[in-house]
Image (tube, rainbow, N blue to C red):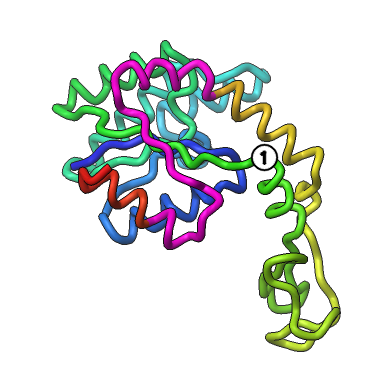
């Protein structure tokens, strides 16, 4: 029953790899943002507390986030966990250790999908999709066979996500570095950190993660 933290900036492929681990290994992804939204929507006791705090424009406390994670761990006993978005501070890292220990668990690996910022900018800013059927393309890596025409449905209308621009990508990178800077040294001292080339192909990244989880790296 592996418990891991998967780190990586937006666009590094973290979501893809988390989904793969869930499908192949039966792990659960504990994304604090998603859990908060679900708890608020469901009107759980923790969700109601979080809703009141968020409506006041305040940040949800570590105690509430920890309670959410504890609930989810209890509901998925026997399954490995992928932590996403938590911990982000040294204090939260210590809280996670306590949460896991209380349930007879421990953190096994911290895996960072390392990326090259310039390459990531190219990867993200080049993405576009067919406005009609949703087929995905890329200016450099996967252009349409006929310029301006969707390979799948023949539509000539395409769209790009408004936040897929260079400034947004660089801002996200800065935010990521700020959030991970406090916890990476903490876990490096414990010998838990492993880095994978996040710019490699999806299957290559997946194989590298599998090698780490299977004790081969």
**136 left or right, relative to 31:** right
Q: Is residue 182 in view from this perspective?
A: yes
Is residue 202 covered in magenta?
yes
Q: Quadrant of residue 176?
A: top right
User: Could you say whether the residue bearing mark 1 is in a helix, strand or loop?
Assistant: helix
> Mark 1 Cα within 10 Å, few/some/many (few <14, many 20+)?
some
> Front-most of 180 and 86?
180
**96 left or right, relative to 39:** left
Q: Quadrant of the C terminus?
A: top left
In percent of width and height, residue 58 lies at 63, 17
Is residue 36 covered in magenta?
no
Residue drawn 74% across the image and 73% down it: 143
Residue positioned most to the top:
91
Seen in the picture, residue 122 relative to 152 is either above or below; the reply is above
> Front-most of 183 and 200?
200
Seen in the picture, residue 38 relative to 201 is either above or below; the reply is above
Number of marks in the rendered image: 1
In percent of width and height, residue 192 lies at 31, 27
Residue drawn 18% across the image and 42% down it: 1
Residue positioned most to the bottom:
154
Q: Is residue 39 in view from this perspective?
A: no
**Would you name the residue on which mark 1 appears?**
117
**50 left or right, relative to 116:** left
Residue drawn 23% across the image and 35% down it: 74
What is the span of residues highlighted in magenta in the rendered image?
180-206
Seen in the picture, residue 38 relative to 200 is either above or below; the reply is above
């Amino acid at each position: 029953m592996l418990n891991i933290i998967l780190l990586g900036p937006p666009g590094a492929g973290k979501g893809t790899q988390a989904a793969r681990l869930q499908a192949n290994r039966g792990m659960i992804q504990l994304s604090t943002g998603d859990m908060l939204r679900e708890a608020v929507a469901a009107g759980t006791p923790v969700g109601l507390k979080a809703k009141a705090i968020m409506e006041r424009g305040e940040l949800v406390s570590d105690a509430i986030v920890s309670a959410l994670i504890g609930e989810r761990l209890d509901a998925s006993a026997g399954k490995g966990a992928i932590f996403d978005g938590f911990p982000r501070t040294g204090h939260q890292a210590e809280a996670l250790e306590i949460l896991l220990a209380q349930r007879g668990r421990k953190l096994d690996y911290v895996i960072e999908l390392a990326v090259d910022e310039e390459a990531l900018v190219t990867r993200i800013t080049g993405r576009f999709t067919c406005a009609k059927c949703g087929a995905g393309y890329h200016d450099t890596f996967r252009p349409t066979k006929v310029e301006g025409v969707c390979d799948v449905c023949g539509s000539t209308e395409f769209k790009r996500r408004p936040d897929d621009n260079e400034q947004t990508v660089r801002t996200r990178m800065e935010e990521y570095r700020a959030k991970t800077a406090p916890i990476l040294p903490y876990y490096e001292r414990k010998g838990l950190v492993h880095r994978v080339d996040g710019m490699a192909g999806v299957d290559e990244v997946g194989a590298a993660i599998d090698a780490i989880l299977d004790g081969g790296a």
